Image (spheres, rainbow, N blue to C red):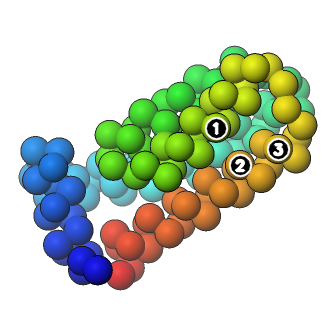
Amino acid sequence: MEDKKQTLITLADTLEIEVDMLKEILILFFENMPGQISAMQAHVPKHEFSEIHVISHTLKGTAANLRYEEISQTAGEIEALALGENGFIEEYEVLFNKLSLQLAHAKMQIFYN
């Protein structure tokens, strides 16, 4: 398994940006994600599916651009559920919890490994 520094270098090379710029982007990504998940959670009981769709679509794309495929896939599952304008609150909560765990794992690999 790559260590933290090598992981950052590899990702920065893949994205064709400097490591310091990547660090700034990742800090912003990980700082903003919990708020985005909370925002989606707040929209579920109100059946505000279009808002959930917009947030989840943005998260899906951002995660994909940063090569976090699992996070992108989970955000895509939330997006699909919202696009169908259905789903039980419990279905969303399972996906939000999954997304939160994936984020925590990704953050640990980059910043605390």
Question: What residue is shown with label 3?
Answer: 91
- Residue 54 location in percent, x, y? 58, 23
Secondary element under disc 2, as helix, strand or loop, is helix
- Amino acid at dot 2: Leu
Secondary element under disc 1, as helix, strand or loop, is helix
* Quarter in which the C terminus is drawn: bottom left
Question: What residue is shown with label 1?
Answer: 77
- Side of 53 where 49 appears, left or right: right
Marks 2 and 3: CB-CB under 8 Å? yes
Q: Residue at x 17, y 45 (%)?
A: 15
* Quarter in which the N terminus is drawn: bottom left
- Side of 36 where 25 appears, left or right: left
Q: Residue at x 88, y 40 (%)?
A: 89
Marks 1 and 2: CB-CB under 8 Å? yes
Secondary element under disc 3, as helix, strand or loop, is helix
Question: What residue is shown with label 2?
Answer: 95
Q: Is residue 51 above or below residue 92?
A: above
Q: Residue at x 49, y 43 (%)?
A: 72
Who comes first in sequence, dot 1 or dot 3? 1
Question: Of residues 84 and 31, which is closer to you in this image?
Answer: 84
- Side of 94 where 66 appears, left or right: left
- Amino acid at dot 1: Glu
Q: Residue at x 57, y 35 (%)?
A: 76
Q: Residues within 10 Å of mark 2 (few under 14, many from 20)?
A: some
- Residue 52 location in percent, x, y? 68, 28
Question: Of residues 81 and 66, which is closer to you in this image?
Answer: 81
Q: Is residue 68 above or below residue 10?
A: above
Q: Is residue 97 above or below residue 62?
A: below
- Residue 7 location in percent, x, y? 23, 68
